[in-house]
């Protein structure tokens, strides 16, 4: 089984090394270069069948990079910003989901299921939230495709646009990291945009994004209860064979388990378990894991798939993103 992964892993390594070389010559951020190279290769030639298994591990490399990155996060800074961050995360998630729901239903007249999937994807953790919610409320496959394609479109654009906006506005590392972590969608693009801005911004972006991700289980349960009651009323109380799942099981199944590893490593590092040399080694390992993850992220962005998103889902998410991102940027600048 492991042998089947090797060819694809070599592809990720090759793209990563090429990105390092190009970035050194061009003076660009090597993580963004890795995504660009992967995107060009994936769309020009595609990923051959013999490499797909290994390339698909890029999500695992992202999780490994995040877990190991915990050793570089200063816990005292997290505690200092803790109350503000917690309020910001909860407020941003709730506001984003509410705004997208309202826009979808009352402005752009999108099907209720698509609106909910877009709200989850925009508010919490991108395509992962779309899939988790879709399975829980038994959404139609076509609706899932529209929502996923829309979220992917914004993932592919915001990871380039956010650093440009941040530099143009002269944002500090902390402000940019918190802002990106609060308002961008999927974990991979958030990490890429954060570290493209600076090391400190990347750490804050990932930290805030993980806090958002942890709310996915709660959001799924809320939606499950809502749709269960709505469908129950629609069938005059008759039992449905397509009943959504709720409860603690849904919370645990949708919870991103790697967050536990990140918190564990962060705590161990801050109580002095790792030496300075070991911390530096872990930081370097995290950089390489992110490099391979972003190479795979680029390979996984398919331009043809992005074209399937209709204009109304795109308009809904774009309007919501502009409203929430602008508001939260002002709030974050005031607080940090």
Image (tube, grey):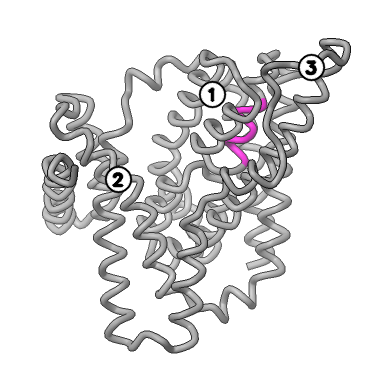
Specify which label sits upstream in the sequence, 2 or 1. Answer: 2
Q: Is label 2 in contact with label 1 (beta carbons under 8 Å)?
A: no
Residue beneath disc 1: 147
Specify which label sits upstream in the sequence, 3 or 2. Answer: 2
Specify which label sits upstream in the sequence, 1 or 3. Answer: 1
Q: Is label 3 in contact with label 2 (beta carbons under 8 Å)?
A: no
Q: Residues within 10 Å of mark 1 (few under 14, many from 20)?
A: many
The Cα–Cα distance between marks 3 and 2, rounded to whole angstroms, is 42 Å
At 59% from the left edge and 43% from the top edge, which residue is drawn? 124
- What's drawn in magenta, residue-wise? 116-123
The Cα–Cα distance between marks 2 and 1, rounded to whole angstroms, is 22 Å
Which quadrant of the rendered structure holds the N terminus? Answer: top left
Which quadrant of the rendered structure holds the C terminus? Answer: bottom right
Q: Secondary structure at mark 2?
A: helix
At 60% from the left edge and 52% from the top edge, which residue is drawn? 212
Of circles 3 and 2, which is in front? 3
* Residue 295 can be seen in this image: yes
User: Residue 159's spot in the image, x, y percent?
Assistant: 41, 43
At 73% from the left edge and 59% from the top edge, which residue is drawn? 87
Of circles 2 and 1, which is in front? 2
* Residue 171 can be seen in this image: no
Q: Quadrant of residue 59?
A: top left
Q: 138 or 95, which lies in front?
A: 138
Residue beneath disc 3: 239
Q: Quadrant of residue 161?
A: top left
User: From the viewer's perspective, is 313 left or right of 246?
Assistant: left
Q: 137 or 188, which lies in front?
A: 137
User: From the viewer's perspective, is 280 left or right of 193?
Assistant: left
Considering the whole magenta stretch, tell me its main secondary structure.
helix
Residue beneath disc 2: 58
Judge whether 23 appears above or below 185 on screen: below
């Amino acid at each position: 089984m492991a042998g089947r992964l090797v060819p694809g892993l070599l592809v990720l390594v090759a793209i990563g090394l090429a990105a390092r070389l190009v970035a050194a010559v061009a003076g660009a951020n090597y993580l963004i270069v890795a995504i660009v190279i992967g995107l060009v290769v994936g769309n020009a030639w595609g990923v051959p069948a013999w490499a797909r298994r290994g390339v698909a591990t890029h999500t695992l490399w992202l999780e490994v990079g995040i877990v190991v990155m915990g050793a570089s996060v200063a816990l005292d800074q997290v505690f200092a910003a803790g109350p503000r961050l917690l309020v910001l995360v909860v407020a941003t998630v709730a506001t984003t989901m509410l705004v997208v729901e309202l826009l979808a239903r009352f402005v752009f007249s999108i099907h209720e299921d698509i609106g909910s999937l877009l709200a989850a994807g925009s508010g919490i953790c991108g395509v992962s939230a779309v899939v988790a919610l879709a399975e829980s409320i038994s959404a139609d496959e076509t609706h899932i495709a529209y929502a996923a394609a829309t979220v992917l479109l914004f993932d592919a654009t915001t990871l380039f646009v956010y650093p440009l906006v941040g530099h143009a506005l002269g944002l500090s590392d902390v402000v940019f990291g918190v802002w990106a972590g609060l308002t961008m969608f999927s974990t991979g693009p958030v990490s890429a945009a954060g570290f493209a801005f600076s090391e400190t911004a990347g750490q804050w972006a990932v930290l805030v994004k993980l806090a958002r991700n942890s709310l996915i289980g709660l959001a799924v349960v809320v939606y499950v209860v809502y749709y269960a009651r709505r469908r129950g009323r629609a069938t005059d109380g008759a039992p449905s064979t397509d009943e959504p799942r709720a409860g603690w099981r849904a919370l645990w199944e949708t919870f991103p388990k790697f967050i536990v590893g990140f918190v564990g490593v962060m705590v161990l590092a801050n109580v002095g378990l790792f030496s300075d040399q070991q911390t530096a080694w872990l930081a370097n390992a995290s950089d390489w894991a992110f490099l391979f993850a972003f190479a795979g992220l680029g390979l996984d962005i398919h331009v043809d798939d992005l074209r399937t998103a209709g204009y109304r889902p795109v308009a809904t998410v774009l309007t919501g993103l502009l409203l929430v991102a602008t508001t939260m940027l002002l709030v974050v600048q005031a607080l940090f």
